[in-house]
Image (cartoon, helix red, strand yellow):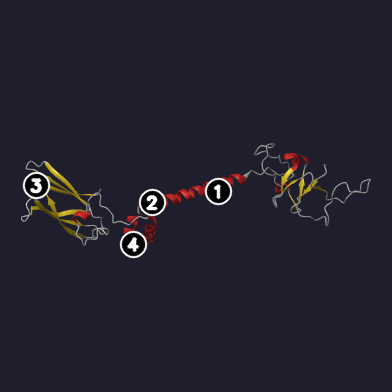
Amino acid sequence: MPEEKYTRCPGCATVFRVTPEQLALRTGQVRCGQCKTVFDGVAQQVSLSPPIPSDAGAPLEEAVPGSPVLPRRDAQALEPPPETPAVALGDRVAETAGEDRFAPAPSTTPRRARAAAYAAVITFLVLLVAAQALFHFRDAIATFWPAARPAFAGLCAMAGCAIRPLRDAAMSHLSIEASDLQADPAHRGLLILTATVRNRAGWPLAYPHLELTLTDAQDRVVVRRALAPADYAGGTADVQGGIAPNAEITLKVFIDASATSQAGYRLYMFYP
């Protein structure tokens, strides 16, 4: 029966039972399964038998000092060091009945570092997309979640943006309840446009632009003019705050039509 061989980790003094075939793997370089120290398993071989003196009076092998009862571990706890070109990833020493073995440990450190880097990049991208979404929908969030308005107001104060009332692009909540275009009897060629715009939504809506089109007797366009909120809203109107929920505004605009001749008009709302 071949003599059992042992090697000792210089880092934690743990003794492992090994075979010559196991020590031949990667030229004897192994990694301790207890403290992860990489060492030369051949150079660190020890004997558990009493030292046998040589002719010169010196022991042939180093004996483990102290009691024969030592912190021994099976060979599977003794791991090879990281992969080297001499041994391909996944090579293992065959295990026979009644024998211990140690198999090459996969190089998990680079894979774990790569996974951590991927996780960090993905987390950053998710946070970036979330930040862009919050910025893009800040008006809607501040409108339907009033508790968030102070935070968005503070961010916009630093970023130079603004929290604006929502727009009713489909005009499903804004409507022109009534409108009229009459000549000003006191000023020839001057027209007076009056209209009532109602907000039927339960939240403020941005003031729309108005498009006034003057037509002739055949309903052909004579002139078309766009009116911004500043052109028709009164001086006391809170244009930045929008039209209040379930409220209406009345506008009155003077139009110079001295250079045209018209018989009718059309009035539309839109957002630029």
- Contact between marks 1 and 4 (CB within 8 A): the answer is no
| Label 4 to label 2: alpha-carbon separation | 18 Å
Where residue 140 appears, as percent x and y from the top left, is 32, 55
Q: Is residue 99 left or right of residue 262?
A: right
Amino acid at pointer 1: Ala
| Label 3 to label 1: alpha-carbon separation | 70 Å
First in sequence: mark 3 vs mark 1: 1
Task: Classify mark 3: helix, strand or loop.
Answer: strand
- Contact between marks 2 and 1 (CB within 8 A): the answer is no
- Contact between marks 3 and 1 (CB within 8 A): the answer is no
| Label 2 to label 1: alpha-carbon separation | 26 Å
Question: Would you identify the image quadrant in which residue 89 lies?
Answer: top right
Q: Which residue is rendered at x = 51% and y = 49% of the image?
A: 120
Q: Which mark is residue 116?
A: 1
Amino acid at pointer 2: Ala
| Label 4 to label 3: alpha-carbon separation | 44 Å
Indicate which label's residue lies in the foreground, 3 or 2. 3
Q: Which mark is residue 58?
A: none
Task: Classify mark 4: helix, strand or loop.
Answer: helix
Amino acid at pointer 4: Pro
Indicate which label's residue lies in the foreground, 2 or 1. 2
Amino acid at pointer 3: Gly
Q: Which mark is residue 133?
A: 2
Question: Would you identify the image quadrant in which residue 4 lies?
Answer: top right
Question: Camera-side residue: 211 or 95?
Answer: 211
| Label 1 to label 4: alpha-carbon separation | 38 Å
Label 3 belongs to which residue?
264
Question: Camera-side residue: 28 or 267?
Answer: 267
Task: Classify mark 1: helix, strand or loop.
Answer: helix
Label 4 belongs to which residue?
146
